[in-house]
Amino acid sequence: MHANNVCHFAIHAVDVDRAKSFYQSVFGWRFEEWGPPDFYLIRTGNEQAPGILGALQKRTEPLGTGFSGYECSISVEEIGRTEASIVKSGGTILVKPVEIPSVGVLVRFADTEGNIACAIQYFTRN
């Protein structure tokens, strides 16, 4: 059985450039423009310790009404089975499965406590 590891996180920021500067100087993370404006891939590690892939993106909701922490994604083998299990176990689907071109299929959900996370079925596993 697949381990279902945390495989991705997203940081939401009012000022993307300020946040990028912070994480570069504090943690040495590397940023790469990708996709929509104000969206960066985050490389947290190096060849010896690759770390987790992340994203830095423009906050879409005012602070206090949306995300106020990191949003994590969990790698799964079968997104449809995972979606059904979330609902059966008392969670709520917030965004139905959506394809991210060349990456995979992602579903956003809330757990039984209102915490928000994502599950993703990658097209290919690294």
Image (cartoon, grey):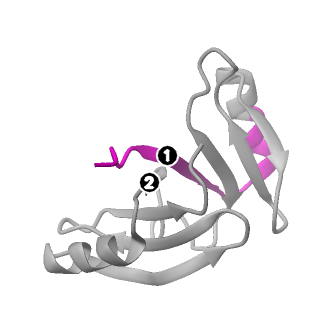
The answer to which of 69 and 101 lies nearer the viewer is 101
Neighbor class of circle 2 (other Cα within 10 Å; few <14, some 14-19, many 20+) is many
Distance from the alpha carbon under mark 2 to that under mark 1: 6 Å
Q: Secondary structure at mark 1?
A: strand
Q: Can you identify the residue that label 2 sits on? A: 75
Q: Is residue 106 left or right of residue 74?
A: right
The answer to which of 21 and 48 lies nearer the viewer is 48
Q: Is residue 114 magenta?
A: no
Give the extent of the magenta segment.
1-21
User: In the image, what residue occupies the spot 40% across and 58% down?
Assistant: 76
Q: Is residue 17 magenta?
A: yes
Tell me if residue 19 can be seen: no
Outermost residue toward the left in this view:
89
User: In the image, what residue occupies the spot 26% across and 80% down?
Assistant: 84
Give, as a three-letter code, the residue at label 2: Ser
Quadrant of the image occupied by residue 111: bottom left
Neighbor class of circle 1 (other Cα within 10 Å; few <14, some 14-19, many 20+) is some
Q: Secondary structure at mark 2?
A: strand
Give, as a three-letter code, the residue at label 1: Cys
Quadrant for the C terminus in the image: top right
Disc 2 + disc 1, Cβ < 8 Å: yes
Quadrant of the image occupied by residue 65: bottom left
